[in-house]
Image: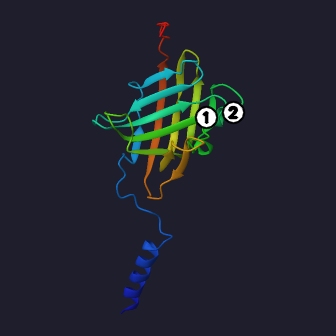
Amino acid sequence: MTSRGRLVLAWLVCACGPDAPKVCVNPGINAALGTVDTTNGDLIRSDDGTKVFLNVPLNDDTAQDQLEVELYPNGGAFTGGPVRPGTYDLAPESSFASCGACVLLYQDVSPDDGKPAGYYMPLSGTLMLTSTDGRLTGSLRDVLFRHVSIDFTSSPIGGTTTIDDGCKVVLDEAAFDLEFPAALPDAGI
């Protein structure tokens, strides 16, 4: 074998060894989302008015990919208080069990039972909220998501584990300015 052949063989061993970065074989979701339009998003508040949920479809597939922003008072970024305006680093919000500013990507959500085929949560990025009263305004910027599994069966709910398959998704920006829907009258149910 020539020295050049040994060099190529050595490179292949290094590139494919146990320490080599994983290459996402089946991403299931667009790896480069770019700028996401949120005007068709669904915005709701919990019955007690403290939790906020924004769901944005990312494609027109029967089993849609979706961007989900879930804001929980007294948790994660909002520890010690309500959901409120501010700028929040998403790196510490990377586990569903402990996030207050929870940002997720749902992959291929089933139209039958509403369950996604996969989940992605942030490694990094920024959530900026400029209003949480009457309207939800702000943006997500430079969010890098990684593929995760979320355990909804154990306590605490939402234990999050990174799936080491190399699948990551980049969201450049998603600006939102949506009015909260009016509260429904009590139907006595």
Q: Residue at x 58, y 18 (%)?
A: 48
**Residue 124, percent across and down?**
56, 46
> Which scheme is used to colour this image of the protein?
rainbow
**Residue 33, percent across and down?**
40, 42
Asked if the residue under mark 1 is in contact with the one under mark 2, i.e. CB atoms within 8 Å, the reply is yes
Q: Residues within 10 Å of mark 2 (few under 14, many from 20)?
A: some
Q: Which mark is residue 100?
A: 1
Quarter of the image with the N terminus is: bottom left
**Residue 170, percent across and down?**
45, 46
Going by the numbered disc 1, the residue's amino acid type is Gly
Who is closer to the viewer here, 35 or 54? 54
Going by the numbered disc 2, the residue's amino acid type is Thr
Who is closer to the viewer here, 124 or 184? 184
Q: Residue at x 58, y 31 (%)?
A: 128
**Residue 146 appearing in the image:** no
User: With respect to residue 125, does 18 lie above or below?
Assistant: below
**Tag 2 residue:** 79
Q: Residue at x 57, y 39 (%)?
A: 126
N-terminal label among 2 and 1 = 2
**Residue 66 appearing in the image:** yes
Q: Residues within 10 Å of mark 1 (few under 14, many from 20)?
A: many
User: With respect to residue 104, does 7 lie above or below?
Assistant: below
User: How many numbered circles does the render carry?
Assistant: 2
Q: Secondary structure at mark 2?
A: loop
> Quick one: which residue is furthest to the bottom in this view?
1
Q: Residue at x 58, y 21 (%)?
A: 132
Relative side of 105 to 85, left or right: left
Snapshot quadrant of residue 129: top right
